Image: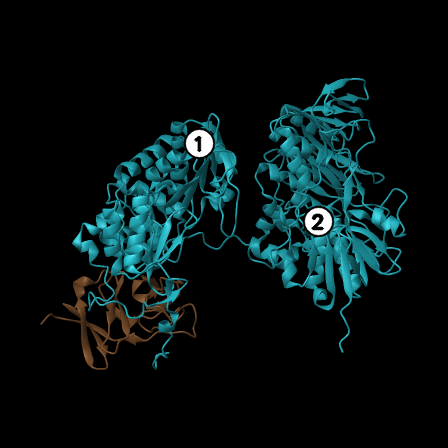
């Protein structure tokens, strides 16, 4: 009989809990232990550090820290929504709220902290919130919908984030901070003053040096204002308490474990509590240096330490650096090392410019060693300065705080850092480890650097070798954007001319490749009306550039057959047309499936059948759906105001209009769109390249959304647009995308990559900062004016029909390898006929 | 001018040269029921390889795009994009894999 595996129970599944599980998995300990996790929240670990990004469009899924399949892969049992209620150390069991009892051999407490709410009257009134979990955010968002004034108690890091969030929700926001300055823990007086000016300029009201005496309530018992310690009263309908956190040590206290005088589960340097079978890590733990660490980096280090100790490996956690860099309300704030100059004899070097809201202070020892610093308004140098802490910088400290262009030029780059300098303090990764990688994704995968707070990513980018060659492929040294400009300005309509005139020397005169041919084909197609070229993608030399899907105007499937998707604008279809599709599918024996884009996909057509199928479809009034092209696919819609009791606009009409306007538009990648008739968003417009959501007074336009493997919520580009404004803006957006995106780059990645991001995009397409808009609009007008249905064009020309044969030497003979077998009353490819025959001597 | 392919039975006429588009291919049905993919490069030279894609089993290589790597012509499978050298049949992305090749010539139309 084999020994049962020892059982490990982890209480708490926050960021540190998840890091601990990953540390166990990396060390093989998930194979040698049965691991059970009890989590209070209804969702697995997520990124609490970036919680506020929920309000700028991140979804709870974006914030998830738990790789999909992680628990299953490592055999970990995760119980959500079922917190531990008690620990019996004698019996070695944990009892959860649902009443289940979990025995343990090893217990790990990662219970985190809870927000501190000062004991003032009214603190529990409806309208009072804390700012800690996704559920807290959802509750604030809901309550804020019908309110106009908000206040935050606490002007620390989280308090400022919360105030920014309230402002983002359309509320006025005031901050009440007891200390004489904002962020008293991290920054000094000068930094606080710079921060205050910038924050007030954003329209927030700040009270410093005053406390909250009472939360006032109105007749209905909900929050109506606050009474401050200076006797003043302020109006507010919503109060967020963000006055610090306290370790959650109640479970440990009840279990009789040692806790600190001011809270925190006491642990030794190996993160063990007073019971050697029980560990405590993260914000609930009181470290040997007598501190409770509320930052994620020390928590991660404790997780690593506890995991090492479990396996008998030597590692100690004796304290951590509290360096931090944040973007608060758009203002960079960083502090590192001895930020307050606490070391005896330390000296300050300060640069302060209240016009630009920049404040920089470095603390140095008398012999020139950098001890720490505070940066407000411009923290770009944080990634370099923090790793230099503890050493004498290679240039004078004043050069490190002066803005570029003042004083001597600063030649200090990441190359100046020593190999052992810690670049990522969240995961304790050195310059040497990062330099061993080639790309940022590789760095993240191999070292985890850059996956914590992300403040080191800029330096990581500078440490890596420059991307070898930005060229599109072996044929062209240019990016797609550059090729677009060449084609546009030189008015080229020939791939061969482009290759021979602009290709790499070794590629000129050759056959190009499968990467650049379709790319150039698409560029020429996008610009065709403007260049005066044929808009038909299969004419002349253009024919040889298209991928097989474009070549046959259908989508190739695994057995070499094709699928057919007629356009159904907006997803609206008459019964008669629906019947035609059914009849065509039946007559040609096609497998039929409804797509995600509100159309119908017909599978299993051979190349010979494609024109016959399309003759019937075109006859019934259908057009190509361009499912095969890097082009506009569909504009989904909900049924809208016409039928739906919630609808506020006619979403179907708008969707049909947009789909007909942009049909056939060739782009760097496929384009999807949707129109929702109200904020309930049934059409899922925020997951589309461009999505439209109706408002009472018009339309909101969202851009850069994506579903698929890397989902992204679309960003709101403009609000309450009229029909004409909406269409004009989409025209500009699409043409700007077509002009500047890389090959196969969806709008989501394009927008992510864009320098200046959404703001820049808005500047260009809304405010016309580049003076491009007239040209973009005219390009789109050309497209709209010259659109013709590709399938109707193909059927009308015998020359174009010639390609639709299976065999050049046996026209009319079907391909004997394209066969089907029945499944669920339809057909599926018969893969048996595709068995690979042994190849002759050439293999 | 016609395009001819060498099979067991001898030279097989496949099509008129003018039926080929530089940079693209066509499929030909051979007497033994197998299939060949016939291509024309930009310089007007024809090539022929087996039409079956060894990675998927589908007979589709004739529908791939022609390209040129280090001066040698290749076709990229339209399904999963592996490239095959048109002269040797060798897969450029997996040295274990190859497709058969055929000798091909153009002949004056008789």
Which is nearer the eye, B68 or A817? A817
Left/right placement of residue A587 relative to residue A439 reads left
Q: Chain of mark 1?
A: A
Q: Which chain is cyan?
A: A
For the view shown, which residue lies furthest in the top direction? A232
Image coordinates of residue A550 in percent, x first then y, are: 31, 53
Q: How many marks?
A: 2
Residue A800 seen in the figure: yes
Q: Residues within 10 Å of mark 2 (few under 14, many from 20)?
A: some
Chain for numbered disc 2: A
Residue name at image x 52 percent, y 36 percent: A680
Quadrant of res A165:
top right
Report crowding for label 1: few under 14, some 14 to 19, many 20 or more residues within 10 A (C-alpha): some
Nearer to us in this view, A721 or A427? A721
* B23 or A691, nearer to the observer: A691
Q: Which chain is brown?
A: B
- Residue A111 located left or right of residue A765: right
* Camera-nearest label, 2 or 1: 1
Q: Quadrant of residue A313?
A: bottom right
* Spot occupied by residue B86 in the image (x, y as percentages of width and height): 31, 69
Against A73, is A575 above or below? above
Residue appearing at x 38%, y 40% in the figure? A570
- A349 horizontally vs A559: left or right: right
Above or below, comparing residue A196 to residue B24 in the picture: above
Q: Where residue B108 sits: x, y (%)?
A: 12, 70
Q: Which residue is mark 2?
A: A81
Where disc 1 sits, the SS reads loop
Q: Residue at x 40, y 30 (%)?
A: A771
Which secondary structure lies at badge 2?
loop
Q: Quadrant of the N terminus of chain A?
A: bottom right
Residue A641: assigned label: 1
Whole-percent x and y of residue A324?
71, 42
């Amino acid at each position: 009989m084999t020994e049962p595996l020892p059982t490990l129970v982890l209480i708490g599944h926050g960021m540190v809990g998840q890091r601990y599980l990953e540390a166990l998995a990396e060390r093989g300990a998930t194979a040698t232990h049965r691991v059970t996790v009890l989590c209070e929240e209804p969702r697995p670990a997520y990124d609490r550090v970036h919680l506020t990004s929920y309000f700028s469009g991140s979804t709870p899924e974006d914030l998830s820290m738990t790789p999909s399949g992680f628990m299953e892969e490592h055999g970990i049992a995760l119980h959500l929504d079922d917190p531990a209620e008690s620990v019996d150390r004698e019996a070695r069991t944990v009892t959860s709220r649902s009443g289940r009892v979990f025995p343990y051999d090893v217990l790990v407490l990662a219970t985190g902290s809870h927000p501190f709410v000062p004991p003032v009257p009214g603190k529990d009134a409806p309208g009072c919130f804390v700012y800690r979990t996704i559920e807290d955010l959802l509750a604030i968002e809901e309550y804020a919908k019908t309110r106009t004034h908000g206040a935050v108690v606490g002007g620390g890091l989280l308090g400022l984030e919360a105030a920014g969030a309230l402002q983002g929700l359309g509320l006025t926001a005031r901050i009440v901070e007891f200390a004489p300055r904002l962020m008293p823990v991290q920054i000094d007086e000068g930094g606080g003053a710079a921060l205050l000016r910038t924050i007030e300029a954003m329209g927030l009201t700040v009270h410093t040096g005053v406390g909250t005496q009472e939360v006032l309530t109105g007749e209905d018992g909900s929050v109506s204002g606050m009474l401050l310690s200076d006797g003043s009263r302020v109006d507010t309908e919503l109060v967020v308490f963000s006055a610090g956190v306290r370790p959650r040590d109640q479970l440990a206290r009840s279990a009789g474990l040692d806790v600190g005088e001011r809270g925190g589960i006491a642990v030794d340097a190996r993160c063990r509590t007073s019971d050697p079978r029980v560990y405590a890590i993260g914000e609930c733990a009181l470290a040997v240096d007598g501190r409770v660490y509320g930052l994620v980096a020390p928590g991660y280090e404790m997780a690593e330490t506890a995991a090492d100790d479990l396996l008998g490996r030597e590692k100690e956690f004796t304290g951590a650096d509290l360096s931090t860099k944040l973007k608060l309300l758009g203002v960079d704030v960083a502090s590192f090392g001895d930020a307050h100059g606490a070391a005896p004899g330390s000296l300050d070097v300060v640069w302060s410019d209240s016009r630009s809201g920049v404040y920089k202070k470095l603390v140095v020892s008398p012999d020139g060693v950098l001890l720490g610093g505070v940066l407000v308004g411009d923290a770009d140098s944080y990634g370099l300065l923090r790793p230099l802490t503890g050493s004498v910088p290679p240039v004078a400290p004043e050069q490190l705080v002066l803005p570029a262009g003042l004083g001597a030029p600063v030649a200090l780059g990441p190359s100046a850092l020593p190999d052992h300098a810690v670049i990522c303090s969240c995961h304790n990764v050195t310059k040497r480890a990062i330099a061993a990688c080639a790309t940022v994704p590789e760095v993240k995968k191999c070292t985890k650097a850059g996956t914590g707070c992300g403040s080191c990513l800029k330096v990581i980018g500078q440490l890596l070798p420059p991307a070898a060659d930005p060229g599109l492929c072996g044929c062209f040294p240019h990016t797609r954007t550059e090729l677009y400009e060449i084609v546009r300005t030189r008015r080229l309509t020939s791939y061969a001319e482009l290759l021979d005139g602009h290709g790499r020397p070794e590629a000129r005169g050759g056959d190009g490749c499968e990467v650049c041919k379709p790319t150039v084909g698409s560029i020429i197609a996008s610009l065709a009306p403007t260049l005066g070229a044929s808009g038909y993608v299969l004419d002349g030399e253009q024919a040889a550039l298209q991928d097989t899907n474009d070549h046959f105007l259908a989508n190739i499937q695994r057995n070499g057959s094709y699928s057919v998707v007629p356009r159904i604008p907006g997803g609206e279809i008459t019964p008669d047309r629906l019947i035609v599709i059914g009849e065509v599918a039946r007559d040609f024996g096609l497998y039929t499936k409804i797509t995600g884009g509100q159309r119908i996909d017909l599978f299993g057509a051979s190349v010979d059948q494609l024109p016959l199928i399309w003759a019937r479809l075109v006859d019934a009034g259908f057009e190509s759906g361009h499912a095969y092209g890097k082009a506009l696919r569909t504009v989904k819609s909900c049924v809208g105001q016409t039928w739906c009791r919630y609808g506020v606009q006619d979403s179907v009409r708008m969707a049909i209009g947009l789909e007909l306007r942009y049909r056939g538009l060739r782009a760097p990648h496929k384009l999807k769109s949707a129109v929702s008739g109200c904020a309930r968003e049934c059409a899922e417009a925020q997951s589309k390249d461009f999505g439209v959501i109706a408002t009472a007074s018009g339309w909101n336009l969202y851009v850069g959304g994506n579903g698929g493997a890397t989902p992204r919520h679309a960003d709101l580009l403009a609000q309450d647009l009229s029909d004409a404004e909406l269409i004009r803006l989409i025209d500009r957006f699409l043409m700007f995308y077509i002009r500047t995106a890389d090959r196969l780059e969806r709008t989501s990645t394009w927008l992510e990559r864009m320098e200046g991001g959404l703001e820049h995009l808005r500047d260009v397409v809304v405010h016309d900062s580049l003076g491009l808009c007239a040209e973009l609009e005219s390009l789109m007008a050309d497209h709209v004016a010259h659109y013709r249905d590709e399938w109707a064009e193909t059927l009308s020309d015998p020359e174009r029909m010639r390609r639709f044969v299976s065999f050049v030497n046996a026209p009319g003979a079907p391909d004997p390898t394209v066969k089907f077998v029945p499944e669920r009353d339809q057909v599926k490819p018969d893969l048996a006929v595709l068995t690979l025959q042994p190849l002759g001597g050439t293999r | 001018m016609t395009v001819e392919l060498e099979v067991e039975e001898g030279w097989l006429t496949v099509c008129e040269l003018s039926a080929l588009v530089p940079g693209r291919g066509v499929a030909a049905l051979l007497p033994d029921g197998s299939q060949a993919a016939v291509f024309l490069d930009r310089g007007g030279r024809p090539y022929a390889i087996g039409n079956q894609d060894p990675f998927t089993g589908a007979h589709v290589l004739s529908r791939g795009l022609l390209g040129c790597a280090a001066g040698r012509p290749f076709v990229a499978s339209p399904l999963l994009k592996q490239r095959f050298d048109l002269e040797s049949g060798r897969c450029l992305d997996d040295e274990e894999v190859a497709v058969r090749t055929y000798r091909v010539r153009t002949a004056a139309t008789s």
